[in-house]
């Protein structure tokens, strides 16, 4: 079966727990009060929420390479995390078919005292690939990262660019059906950037769906054939990349005029 | 049967169980990292533990006026078992907040982090066992054969409870941040209330009170057989009952709160 992503009427709300709300003692006091007086209004207990995603309807099919465009806080990362299975919804239906790999956060789970080599195995374990699988991929990862002798040095001796190389090389060594990328190409030197872009294109050819959130327009342009423009947690436009980009540009100019 | 297929707690548990290579590797690696930059490595922990248990033994056998040989195995094993259980309980409420970064960027289930932590604690406990063995063979080498069966079963039972409890308390501790300090401050009096330093029969007619303390059972099932205390069926019945409660609490809590965890971190 071909891979697809279908979202219907999906909402994601972030409940806000302030200090008062967050204590066990207080919630106990609150309920006991309510029991005794039974006058407290339901609304006063209703939590404040920040709206992450509002009424999202989306249908992404085989071969779609979708660019996520929009200002900061538009909900791009939230949408990616929802598809990655990190956030769960209360309302609406989410159906995803195909294996998902997400490159959302660089260098998560890195251990400073472990060597680069060991960190590759750690990262794989965290992503659910047992050490055996990691060892199989190792040569490709080592070749791609070009870290040479440094791979056997502890991570705390690495520069941020070297960390980025390690994280990217590890994460990209997968062959998923659905690939999610969130601002991944920002670090690393110029030659590594060129290489990474080529590599993503190659992985993309194998993967059937790509979702890519980035502000680096020149990178997105060569990769994507569709575009989503998001604002305030809503999808304003979903269609061809050119149209989405045009609407995004218009929005930026409108903001400037204000 | 439908319940077993649809319940997310059991589903996730099965998923992580199949993924055992990953978390077991990470736990082993955490242990390795812990000792990487130390000269004596694991020996420090063993020496430290031996030293504190030895001093406690010397002190309390004098105060209680006990035969120190007999008391030595009792205290050594009790103290080491207690340290394992109490470390697990104390770390439980903070388990998810400390792994926040991983939880918000990968789709591993919360059970994965609990298993990683609990396995690390188990490995730490296991390398204290030679210390107990040395003391046993030095002091009273006549332990019964059935210990070879009961001890592993006890260890497994304690591990299951520790994992389930870590997840349940971890979920609550992520939502209510004052559970962590509460648990930390409760564990000190619990140490005194659990028969680790003293023997239940020292309480005289108040002895039945120890059965109200859940820790008694778990310390009991692990310790009694290796120290030559008579087999006590109540300890096992109690431990199995608590396990059952733990399983039910875990299933109910996990099924309803798992998806909310991410918003609590």
Image (cartoon, coloured by chain):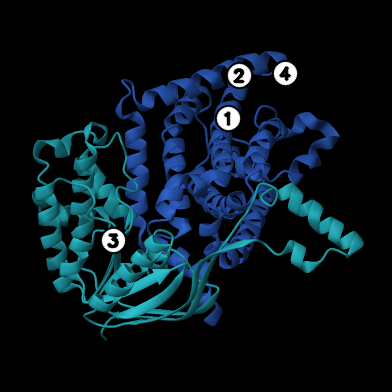
Q: Which chain is cyan?
A: A
* Marks 4/3 same chain: no
Between A1 and A19, the one lying in front of the other is A19
- Quadrant in which residue B224 is drawn: top right
x, y percentage for residue A247? 32, 74
Residue on which disc 4 sits: B64
Mark yes or no: residue B231 visible: no
Local crowd size for mark 1, using a 10 Å CA cut-off: few (<14), some (14–19), many (≥20): many
**Is residue A192 placed above or below B82 in the rendered structure?**
below
Q: Which residue is mark 2?
A: B56
Disc on res. A214: 3
Q: Position of residue B253 (x, y in %)?
A: 61, 62
Q: Are marks 4 and 1 on the same chain?
A: yes
Q: Secondary structure at mark 2?
A: helix
Counting residues from the start of the chain, the first of labels 1 and 2 encountered is 2
Which residue position is annotated with label 1? B79
Residue at 61% x, 40% y: name it: B219
* Image depth: mark 4 or mark 1 in front: 1
Q: Using the numbered discs, state the Cα–Cα distance from disc 4 to disc 3 in whole angstroms.
A: 70 Å
The numbered dot on residue A48 is none
Q: Chain of mark 4?
A: B
Q: Position of residue B133 (x, y in %)?
A: 46, 30
Secondary-structure class at tag 1:
helix
Gap between marks 1 and 2 measured at Cα: 9 Å
Choose between A129 and B56: the one closer to the eye: A129
Q: Colour of chain B?
A: blue
Which comes before the other along the chain, label 2 or label 4?
2
């Amino acid at each position: 079966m071909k891979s697809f992503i279908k979202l219907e009427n999906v909402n994601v709300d972030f409940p806000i727990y302030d200090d008062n709300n967050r204590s066990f003692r207080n919630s106990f006091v609150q309920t006991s009060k309510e029991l005794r007086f039974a006058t407290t209004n339901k609304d006063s207990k209703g939590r404040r929420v920040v709206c992450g995603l509002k009424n999202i309807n989306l249908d992404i099919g085989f071969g779609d390479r979708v660019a996520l465009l929009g200002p900061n806080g538009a909900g791009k990362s939230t949408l990616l995390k929802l598809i990655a299975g990190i956030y769960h919804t209360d309302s609406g239906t989410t159906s995803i078919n195909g294996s998902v790999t997400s490159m959302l956060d660089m260098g998560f789970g890195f251990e400073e005292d472990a060597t680069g080599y060991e960190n590759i195995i750690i990262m794989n374990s965290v992503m659910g690939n047992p050490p055996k699988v990691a060892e199989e991929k190792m040569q490709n990862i080592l070749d791609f990262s070009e870290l040479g002798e440094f791979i056997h040095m502890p991570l705390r001796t690495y520069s941020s660019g070297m960390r980025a190389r390690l994280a990217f090389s590890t994460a990209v060594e997968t062959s998923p059906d659905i690939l999610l990328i969130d601002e991944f190409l920002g670090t690393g030197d110029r030659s590594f950037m060129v290489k990474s872009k080529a590599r993503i294109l190659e992985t993309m050819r194998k993967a059937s769906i790509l979702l890519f959130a980035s502000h680096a327009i020149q990178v997105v342009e060569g990769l994507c054939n569709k575009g989503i423009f998001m604002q305030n947690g809503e999808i304003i436009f979903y269609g061809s990349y050119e149209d989405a980009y045009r609407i995004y540009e218009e929005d930026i100019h409108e903001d400037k005029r204000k | 049967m439908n319940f077993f297929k649809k319940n997310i707690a059991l589903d996730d548990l099965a998923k992580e169980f199949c993924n055992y290579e990953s978390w077991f590797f990470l736990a082993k690696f955490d242990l390795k990292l812990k000792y990487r930059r130390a000269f004596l490595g694991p020996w420090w922990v063993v020496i430290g533990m031996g030293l504190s248990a030895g001093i406690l033994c010397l002190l309390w056998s004098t105060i209680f006026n006990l035969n120190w040989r007999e008391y030595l195995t009792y205290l050594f094993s009790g103290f080491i078992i207690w340290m394992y259980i109490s470390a697990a309980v104390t770390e439980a409420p903070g388990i998810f907040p400390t792994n926040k970064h991983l939880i918000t960027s990968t789709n591993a289930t919360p059970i994965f982090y609990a298993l990683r932590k609990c396995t690390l604690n188990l490995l730490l406990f296991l390398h204290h066992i030679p210390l107990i063995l040395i003391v046993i063979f030095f002091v009273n080498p006549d332990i019964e054969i059935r210990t070879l069966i009961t001890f592993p079963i006890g260890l497994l039972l304690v591990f299951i409870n520790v994992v389930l409890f870590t997840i349940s308390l971890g979920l609550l501790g992520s939502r209510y941040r004052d559970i962590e300090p509460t648990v930390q401050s409760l564990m000190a009096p619990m140490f005194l209330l659990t028969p680790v330093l003293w023997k239940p029969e020292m309480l005289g007619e108040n002895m039945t009170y120890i059965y109200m303390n859940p820790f008694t059972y778990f310390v009991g099932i692990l310790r009694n057989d290796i120290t030559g205390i008579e087999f006590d069926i109540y300890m096992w019945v109690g431990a199995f009952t608590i396990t059952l409660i733990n399983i039910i609490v875990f299933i109910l809590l996990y099924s309803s709160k798992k998806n909310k965890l991410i918003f609590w971190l």
